[in-house]
Amino acid sequence: MIDELSVRILIKKLHHTYNQVQMSVYFITGIDTDAGKTFATGLAARYLLRCGKKVITQKLVQTGHDTNLSGDILIHRQLMQCETFAEDIDGTTSPYRFTFPASPELAAKLEGQTLDPSNIAAATERLLTRFDTVLLEGTGGFCVPLTPSMLVADYVAIKKYPVILVTSGKLGSINHTVLTLEAIHHRKIPLAGIVFNDYPQTDETIRQDSFDLFQRHCKKIVTLPHVDLNAIPNVDFSAVFY
């Protein structure tokens, strides 16, 4: 049986840290690749725009794309229903783009490049001179290699960005979610909230059990519905941001 008391205490500690440190940059990560980070990031930005905030999204590292513009950033703009920004064109919102769909460390190595995290941080700082909030989407899961000597989780810990964790109701999500929360807690990173990606639909019994567990112990939870780019939903992210 899951030690629900331990999960509740863990999330309570993470939220306590977050309540003490309110930030202008939020890091959106997932329990694994294809968890729904891109849609969660774009819809969160859409919500903040509707609240009157001057917001922009950024991609930590884009892999698996061979275009000059980040594919994930372009999806963000579709969800926000806005044109691309000058910062998208000049690469500020996606400082590193690699063709091979792998971890940033491997993708950079295959293209003979050296990834410098300070360039990503500098890009974020430039964005903050023009925008109230930056939503920084990660790549893959939380503990993937960013460089040969640094995980994505380590970078976020150094920057102390509050984390928005995207999970789901598929088989294995409870294990992946709790392990990610422990990695966040171990590094003393604040947790802004959890996004429960309700698509694609999986076994309903498993989905409901997963959602019930997360909801019992995390009040800052947002449910992400199926997203149709031709009929973009307005998702309420107030539980995460306020």
Image (cartoon, rainbow, N blue to C red):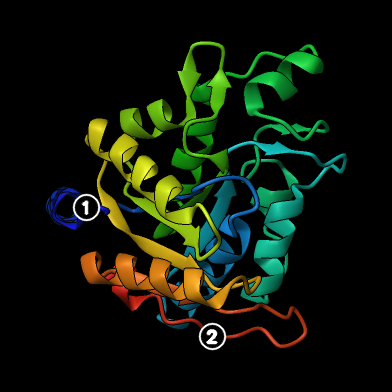
Q: In the picture, which quadrant includes the C terminus?
A: bottom left
Q: Is residue 45 above or below residue 72?
A: below
**x 48%, y 64%: residue:** 55
Residue type (three-letter) at the residue carrying disc 1 = Val
Q: Could you tell me residue 60's position as x and y percent?
A: 57, 39
Q: Nearer the viewer, mark 1 or mark 2?
A: 1
Determine crowd level at label 1: few under 14, some 14-19, many 20+ residues with C-alpha closer than 10 A. some
Q: Could you tell me residue 85's position as x and y percent?
A: 67, 58
Q: Secondary structure at mark 1?
A: helix
**x 22%, y 35%: residue:** 188
Residue 82 visible from this viewpoint: no
Q: Earlier in the sequence, mark 1 or mark 2?
A: 1
115 relative position to 65: left or right: left
Question: Which of the 4 quarters of the picture holds residue 219?
Answer: bottom left
Q: Secondary structure at mark 2?
A: loop
Determine crowd level at label 2: few under 14, some 14-19, many 20+ residues with C-alpha closer than 10 A. some
Residue, disc 2: 234
Residue type (three-letter) at the residue carrying disc 2 = Asn
Q: Nearer the viewer, residue 22 or 129?
A: 22
Q: Could you tell me residue 89's position as x and y percent?
A: 75, 48
Q: Is residue 179 above or below residue 119?
A: below
Q: Residue furthest right?
A: 66
**x 38%, y 42%: residue:** 180
Q: Nearer the viewer, residue 36 or 5?
A: 5
The disc label shown at residue 7, or none = 1
Q: Could you tell me residue 31's position as x and y percent?
A: 49, 48
Q: CA distance from mark 1 to mark 2?
A: 30 Å
The disc label shown at residue 237, or none = none
